[in-house]
Amino acid sequence: MMWWVGTQEAVSAAERAAAARVVGQPEFIDGVEVAPEDRVTQRWAFLMPTASGEWAIPAHPDLKPAGVALVAAVEWPAEDEA
Amino acid sequence: MQILRGWRTPIAGWTQTALTKLVPWTLEDIPASFRSNGGLWEAKNAQTTADSVTQIPDSFDVRPMVQTSAAYQPKFAVVDGHPAAVWPEADNNVHLVPNTGSNYNPVFWLILGQFSDGLVKTFPAFNNLISNGWTGGVGNAARYRARVFGESGTGKLFADAWATEASINARPASADVLPLPKSMIVMRGAASAGGDARYLWGLGRSSGSSLRGWRGPIWAALALGVEPPKELLARIEGRMAWNYGIQGKLPLGHPYRDVEPMKEPE
């Protein structure tokens, strides 16, 4: 899994670009397309903070947005659990 | 002659005219008193994009399992002959969860699922099967009790979680769950687990950036707010097993290993 990492503004812009690819695409139940108002997909991903204070989202495989780094691993803030 | 199905032994003395043509007992026949604080989600009913699951309707018609973010939607695929929501074979945050405000408080879960390829003997991470999204409270134990997950590096469920043991294919409950090929996974926990948890139980890891999602397919999930008694549990296990072709994995002597659960027509 690849990630886009950068400033909040850059990652937000990358997220909007990816969302433009996935929002509004047809959705189906048992092969029958649902009405546009019944589609569920609303975004590409939520932004998540990294350990270094940057932001990250999963990378869309078909896009190369400016201003974000494409990385294979992200250092996340420590979680208080196993 | 009508065939009386669903009985394990012939009933002496019955005449042909007394026999009734039975119909399948289905999971929708679970009494309403058990359904509250629960739900029934089967991937065969999923709403999908070209390749991903966006939501699975609740067959009890209360709380669909939803994922509005494309990057966190499980894939949709036919696995072992049945439609499934499939979690990636890598660290992930993929999950399905009811909409905010659809809180519920189950005590019983049955997941028809598989971990990874069904052969893996140890969890590669603290992979979450179910979680209620709660990250508050003080101390690890409180947080653990908001989910059920594998213990990284072992084949066991993590101790001190909402459920620390599971019954696999109607066998006695155990912490040892791997390897886990296509199976029924029954877990039980306290309705009040997790302190002030939001009780928004979902499939996979529904909180945080932990990348501790499930791996592999989930075909169906059933949650109940009341523990089913023995006969109802056997019917549930039998119906789920027959619907998904794993009745042969039920223990010898299970009342529905050789016959489907049936009922009188209404």
Image (cartoon, coloured by chain):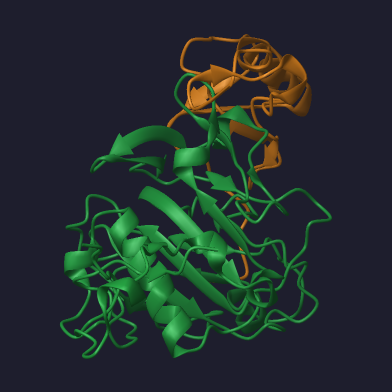
Chain colours: A orange, B green
Asked if residue B186 can be seen in this view, the reply is yes
Mark count: 0
Picture coordinates of residue B215, whole percent (x, y): 37, 50
Tell me which residue sits at (71%, 61%) in the image.
B200
Q: Picture quarter containing residue B266? A: bottom right
Q: Quadrant of residue B182?
A: bottom left
Position of B91 compared to B96: left or right?
left
**On screen, B124 above or below B45?**
below
Q: Position of residue A13 (x, y in %)?
A: 73, 16
Answer above or below: position of B247 versus B87: below
Where is residue B264 shown, x and y percent of the image? 45, 69
Q: Nearer the viewer, residue B138 or B17?
A: B17
**Residue B52, how many percent across, how many down?**
49, 29
Residue B47 is left or right of residue B76, and the answer is right
Q: Nearer the viewer, residue B74 or A54?
A: B74
Q: Is residue B202 left or right of residue B249?
A: right
* Residue under the image location 48 percent in, 10 percent down: A62
Q: Say above or below: B68 vs B137.
A: above
* In the displayed structure image, the side of residue B92 where residue B35 appears, left or right: right
Q: Quadrant of the N terminus of chain A?
A: top left
Considering only vertical position in the picture, is B23 above or below B186? Answer: above
Q: Is residue B164 visible?
A: no
| Quarter-of-image position of residue B137 | bottom right
- Identify which residue, A45 or B238, lies in the foreground: B238
